[in-house]
Amino acid sequence: MVAQTFSMSPRGPFDLAYQQGFFGGWPPFEPDPSAVAMAFPVEGWTHSAAVVLRQPEAGRITGEVHGADGETARAAWEQALAVLSLDVDGTDFPAVGERDPVVGRLQAQHRLMRPTLFHSPYEAACNFVIGQRISIVQARALRARMAVEEGDRISAGGAQLHAFPRPQALLQLESIRGLPDEKVTRLQGIAEAALAGVLDRARLRSLPVEDALAELSSLRGVGPFSSVGIVFRGAGVVDDVTDEPVTKQAVQRLYSLDHLPDQAEVLRIAESWRPFRMWSLVLLHVWIRGEGGGPERPSRAGRDRRHQ
């Protein structure tokens, strides 16, 4: 199948190389190490595709879609753009930093970096279920192995890429090597929800955040922590503020507060971040996990509750 080519001009500043270096996680693309290559099930779930993205100049992103054609290829291209938050007009994001010097310093330090999302809310949900009570490294290895063993393989520019299994593939499995039976049952419930349209990115973005969180929390194995991750790191809500300890700790340190703020105070401070409150918050999280020395770890009891 001949690769389909696309291009677009980012609305607002964007640096693909920095984004990949900081937030990447995609395997190196041996034919062109400067490119970002991602493989994933395309929403609609009839095909998987590989998308190879490049930034030949500041104002242009190009893409080659492998493994799909026609409308499916276009859907894959648009899904890849959403992963990099390039489906959002970020022209006014720098203005947030002009209103709030704290955010402005972080924007300058990180080249106005945008959030990088999971390939889809479906993959985000699967990630959080797989990752319960194991390390990030273990979870990443399990997902990669599932892609090789059960996902679609796509040839892209001489390289072989593997997509995470489509929902239909998960439903056909009786067991998954390395996962307990309960996690397999939970993954298959997520697969059913994906096929029913519950996890469509556009649908989740269209819902009030509280409604989306409540709906996702009703899925087996998806508690409050995972539902927040699916909505904000899977669907990619742009203008909202999560209510969790890491955000409060980052705000306390960066804004030199003598107390840990409650959610109401965080929201007051974040008012100047509109309409990019989540983009700004991601920069605060990047800071606290790096330069800020790391967030305080929750108690074991707290970790157990959030994974229920």
Image (spheres, rainbow, N blue to C red):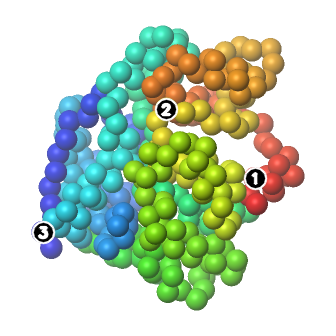
Q: In the image, is residue 199 above or below residue 298?
A: below
Count of picture labels: 3
3D distance between C-alphas at marks 3 and 2: 38 Å
x%, y% of residue 132?
A: 69, 62
The amino acid beneath tag 1 is Arg
- Quarter of the image where one finds residue 245: top right
x%, y% of residue 15?
A: 33, 34
Nearer the camera: disc 1 or disc 3: 1
Residue, x 67% and y 32% (percent of image)? 247
Residue, x 64% and y 78% (percent of image)? 185
Residue that carries the numbered disc 2 in the rendered image:
239
Image quadrant containing the N terminus:
bottom left
x%, y% of residue 149?
A: 46, 81
Neighbours of disc 3 within 10 Å: few (<14), some (14-19), many (20+):
few
Residue that carries the numbered disc 3 in the rendered image:
2
3D distance between C-alphas at marks 2 and 1: 24 Å
Image quadrant containing the C terminus:
bottom right
Please tell me whether mark 1 sits on a helix, a strand or a loop: helix
3D distance between C-alphas at marks 1 and 3: 46 Å
Residue that carries the numbered disc 1 in the rendered image:
306
Is residue 11 visible in the rendered image? The answer is yes
The amino acid beneath tag 2 is Asp
Q: Which mark is residue 157?
A: none
